[in-house]
C-alpha cells in the first residue's frame, strides 16, 4: 500500500525504497522495476537483472526492461521485449492476485507499444495503443492496492496533449481523477489541457500544488 500511495503522491524515494524492500523480502523484482519506470529512473531499471520466475511478474519485468531500453535509445531491444510481453499476454493463463495475466500484460504491452509509436512520430497509432491499455485498466476488478503503480491514462492523456486534442485530454484526466482522486500526475495533465483550450486552470493549479506538496519529483508531463 505504501508503494502504491507514494507512487501516486510523487514521493519517489519512499516508493522505490518500499519496492526494493519488497524485492529483498520476496526475491521478486517486478514492483521495483515498475516503480522505477513510474519515476523515470530508466538507468536503474536496466541494473535490475533478476527476472521474476512467475509468468505475470516476469512479463511486467519484460515491459519495464523494454521501456527503459526505449528511453535509452535502444529501439531494437525495446521491440524484442515488446514481442515477449505481447506473446505472454496472448497465451497467459496465469494471474496476479485477482487479475489475469492477459489483462495486466495487455496494459503493459499497450503502454510500451504506444510509447514506441509516439517516439517514432506516429501519434495516431500511439493514441490507439494507449487507449486500448486504458480501457483494459478500466476493466480491472477493484483491488486495494491496485496491481500497477501508474495508470495508462497518464500516457494516453499526454499523447492527446501532444496532438493538441485538448478537450479529449481533459476528459481522460478527469476520468482518471475520479478513479484516483487528487493525484498530481493527472492534475498536471488536466491543467495543461485546460490551458491548451484557453480555459482557467487556477483551481486545478491550486489542487496540484496541494497534491504535490510532499513530492520529491519534478514533472513536466503525466508520464516519463
Image (tube, helix red, strand yellow):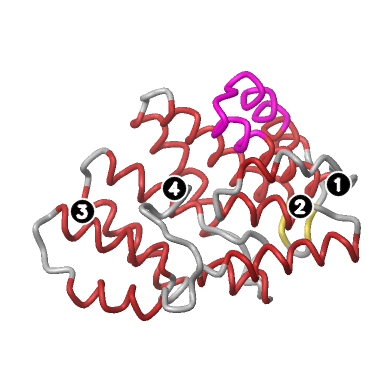
The tag on residue 167 is 3
Which comes sooner in the sequence, label 1 or label 3? Answer: 1
Distance of label 4 from label 1 (alpha carbons): 25 Å
Q: Which mark is residue 52?
A: 1
Is label 1 in a helix, a strand or a loop? Answer: loop
Place residue 91 in its image quadrant. top right
Tell me if mark 2 has few (under 14), some (14-19) or many (20+) residues whose alpha carbon lies within 10 angstroms of its own. Answer: many
- What residue do we see at 43% from left, 76% from top? 181
> Is disc 1 surrounded by few (<14), some (14 to 19) or many (20+) residues within 10 Å?
some
Dot label at residue 30: 2
Labels 1 & 3 near each other (Cβ < 8 A): no
Q: Nearer the viewer, mark 4 or mark 3?
A: 4
> Horizontal and vertical percent for residue 81?
69, 29
60 versus 81 height, above or below: below
Is the stretch drawn in magenta largely helix, strand or loop? helix
Drawn side of residue 177 relative to residue 161, left or right: right
Closer to the N terminus: mark 2 or mark 3? 2
As helix, strand or loop, the secondary structure at mark 3 comes to helix
User: Could you say which is closer to the camera, residue 23 or residue 109?
Assistant: 23
Question: On the rendered structure, is 64 left or right of 214?
Answer: right
Range of the magenta residues?
A: 66-84
State the separation of the CA atoms marked 4 and 2: 20 Å
Residue at 90% of width from left, 45% of height from top? 53
Q: CA distance from mark 1 to mark 3?
A: 40 Å
Quadrant of the image occupied by residue 24: bottom right
Q: Judge depth for marks 1 and 3 and give the one in front.
A: 1
N-terminal of the pair, mark 1 or mark 2, is 2
Query: How many C-alpha atoms fall within 10 Å of the one at disc 3: few (<14), some, or many (≥20)?
Result: some
Residue placed under numbered mark 4 in the picture: 155
Amino acid at each position: 500500500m505504501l508503494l502504491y500511495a507514494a507512487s501516486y503522491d510523487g514521493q519517489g524515494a519512499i516508493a522505490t525504497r518500499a519496492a526494493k524492500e519488497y524485492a529483498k523480502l520476496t526475491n521478486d523484482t517486478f514492483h521495483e522495476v515498475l516503480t522505477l519506470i513510474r519515476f523515470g529512473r530508466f538507468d536503474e531499471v536496466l541494473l535490475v537483472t533478476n527476472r521474476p520466475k512467475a509468468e505475470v511478474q516476469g512479463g511486467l519485468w519484460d515491459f519495464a526492461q523494454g521501456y527503459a531500453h526505449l528511453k535509452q535509445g535502444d529501439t531494437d531491444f525495446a521491440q524484442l521485449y515488446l514481442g515477449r510481453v505481447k506473446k505472454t499476454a496472448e497465451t497467459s493463463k496465469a494471474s496476479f492476485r485477482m487479475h489475469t495475466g492477459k489483462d495486466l500484460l495487455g496494459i503493459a504491452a499497450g503502454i510500451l507499444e504506444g510509447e514506441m509509436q509516439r517516439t517514432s512520430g506516429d501519434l495516431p497509432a500511439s493514441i490507439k495503443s494507449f487507449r486500448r491499455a486504458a480501457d483494459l485498466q478500466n476493466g480491472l476488478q477493484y483491488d486495494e492496492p491496485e496491481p500497477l503503480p501508474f495508470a495508462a491514462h497518464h500516457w494516453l492523456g499526454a499523447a492527446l496533449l501532444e496532438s493538441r486534442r485538448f478537450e479529449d485530454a481533459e476528459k481522460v484526466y478527469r476520468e482518471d481523477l475520479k478513479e484516483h482522486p487528487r493525484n498530481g500526475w493527472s492534475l498536471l495533465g488536466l491543467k495543461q489541457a485546460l490551458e491548451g483550450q484557453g480555459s482557467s486552470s487556477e483551481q486545478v493549479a491550486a489542487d496540484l500544488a496541494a497534491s504535490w506538496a510532499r513530492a520529491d519529483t519534478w514533472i513536466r508531463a503525466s508520464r516519463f
